[in-house]
Image (cartoon, helix red, strand yellow):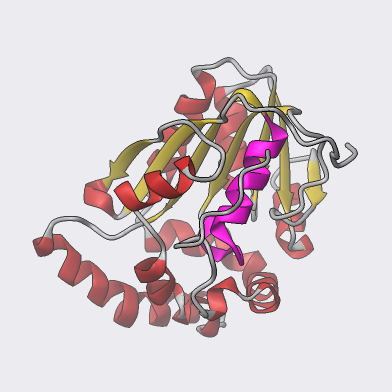
Amino acid sequence: MTTSPASSPSRPQGGKDQDPDFVHRAFSSIAKRYVVTNHFLSLGIDVLWRKKVASLVSADDPRIILDVATGSGDLAMAVQKENPEARVIATDFCAPMLEEARKRGLRDLLVADGLRLPFSDNSVDALTIGYGLRNMADWGAALIEFSRVLKPGGRLVVLDFSLPSHALLRSPYRFYLHRVLPRIAGWLTGNREAYAYLGDSIERFPSGAEMQKLIEANGFEPADWYPQMGGISSVYSARAKDEEAPLASLSS
């Protein structure tokens, strides 16, 4: 794609959560406890959010699905279950996380940076990313990279945290994010630092209409927004624009 990243809010805002070295170090340290911690902190509701992503992907009957920033593979597994005939490729730039995914039965795994995916232009039918875009150094550049590897009309589905729109829910949720969650996660994983910046990263990360605009400004058709549990998490779905691909492409 020839689109340039949107100047705002695609660029990093200075948080540690968008520093590749910090993110790699943090996720490597919590890899073995990542799945248990996530399910505990969300009371298991995150399973339903991933099912929403998988159902959106399956509507197109895709043959090749790429799950970026797969971590320990929760979303890739949900997508594979919903699309049993498809090839689901899962990538992450953190090898220890992929080792956990491998232990859970995933085999089509690849260490790769989401900003520089080792796939040819127009090579995948659908691309998913769960709780990974927020931690990338440049959100707009990541979206352009996703649009590059997607076939024209291919579906992007993004799952990430957001802030509830209703004030009665937003205030207690913010208290939980900044005061409660880091302590519980630190106790479960032994690394509080890995979660200390989660609240700040969610505060900075665009959500709702702002995220729809960001997606549309970086290689995609109008995006749909599906708030989950009052906006605690959000699912976004959009199709890659049918534009002329650049002359140069990464090899598969």
Q: Position of residue 169 (x, y in %)?
A: 15, 61
* Residue 208 is at least partly visible in this image: no
Q: Is residue 72 above or below residue 56?
A: below
149 in the magenta segment: yes
For residue 202, which quarter of the picture? bottom left
The residue positioned 29% from the left and 55% from the top of the image is 232
For residue 198, which quarter of the picture? bottom left
224 in the magenta segment: no
Q: Is residue 231 above or below residue 19?
A: above
Residue sitting farthest toward the right? 251
Which of these two is toward me, 159 or 215? 215
Q: Is residue 217 left or right of residue 97?
A: left
The residue positioned 40% from the left and 82% from the top of the image is 183
How would you classify the magenta stretch by its main secondary structure? helix
Quadrant of the image containing the N terminus: top right
Q: Is residue 219 above or below residue 181?
A: above
* Residue 98 is at least partly visible in this image: yes
Quadrant of the image containing the C terminus: top right
Q: Position of residue 4 (x, y in %)?
A: 61, 50
Which of these two is toward me, 55 or 163? 163
Which of these two is toward me, 223 or 79? 223
Q: Is residue 82 left or right of residue 165?
A: right
Per the rendered image, the range of residues in magenta is 133-150
Q: Is residue 100 left or right of residue 205?
A: right
